[in-house]
Amino acid sequence: MDDGGVRYVKKGELAFRVIAGEGVLVPIKGGVGDLHSIFTMNEVGTAIWGLIGPERTTAEIARLVCDEFEVTSEQANQDVATFVKTLFDKGLIEPVPAGGRGSEMP
């Protein structure tokens, strides 16, 4: 799905907070939090979530994860690819069209 050169943006209206070291993401539907779709993240997932945006490719995110968490580049690439696929499959992110910024507002 991603060779490391894809950029993603967060999709839809989302509420995100860090609670007790874990990221908690709640999709907002009709102005109300969808409590049946709460998504929790560990420290690495929280860092990846914070780095996702049109300015960074997944390869760049993996390099930053490698540096911050002192893991091998192979492990960082695998972790980022797996987590990004999960976020994509859940409809929480979308790829940025070539030359575009996705649906994220500036």
Image (cartoon, rainbow, N blue to C red):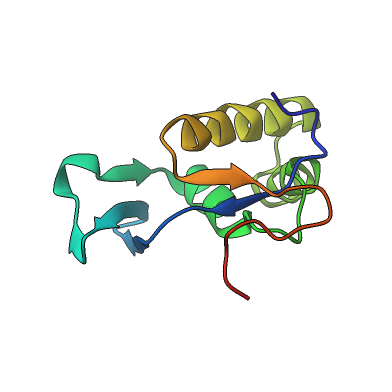
In front: 106, or 50?
A: 106
The quarter of the image holding the C terminus is bottom right
Does residue 94 appear left or right of residue 13 in this picture? right
Which residue is at 84% across, 55% downward?
99
Circle count = 0
Please state the horizontal and vertical placement of residue 53, each as a whole percent of the image: 65, 58
Does residue 53 appear left or right of residue 88 in this picture? right
Which residue is at 74% across, 48% downward?
97
The image quarter containing residue 29 is bottom left
Does residue 100 appear left or right of residue 49 in this picture? right
The quarter of the image holding the N terminus is top right
Please state the horizontal and vertical placement of residue 22, each as a whole percent of the image: 35, 51
Please state the horizontal and vertical placement of residue 15, each as a whole percent of the image: 33, 63
Please state the horizontal and vertical placement of residue 9, each as a whole percent of the image: 60, 54
| Residue found at the far bottom of this picture | 106
Which residue is at 21% across, 66% downward?
31
Q: As displayed, is residue 55 above or below residue 1?
A: below
The image quarter containing residue 71 is top right
Q: As displayed, is residue 18 above or below residue 58?
A: below
Which residue is at 58% across, 48% downward?
48
In front: 84, or 80?
A: 84
In front: 85, or 40?
A: 85
In front: 13, or 84?
A: 13
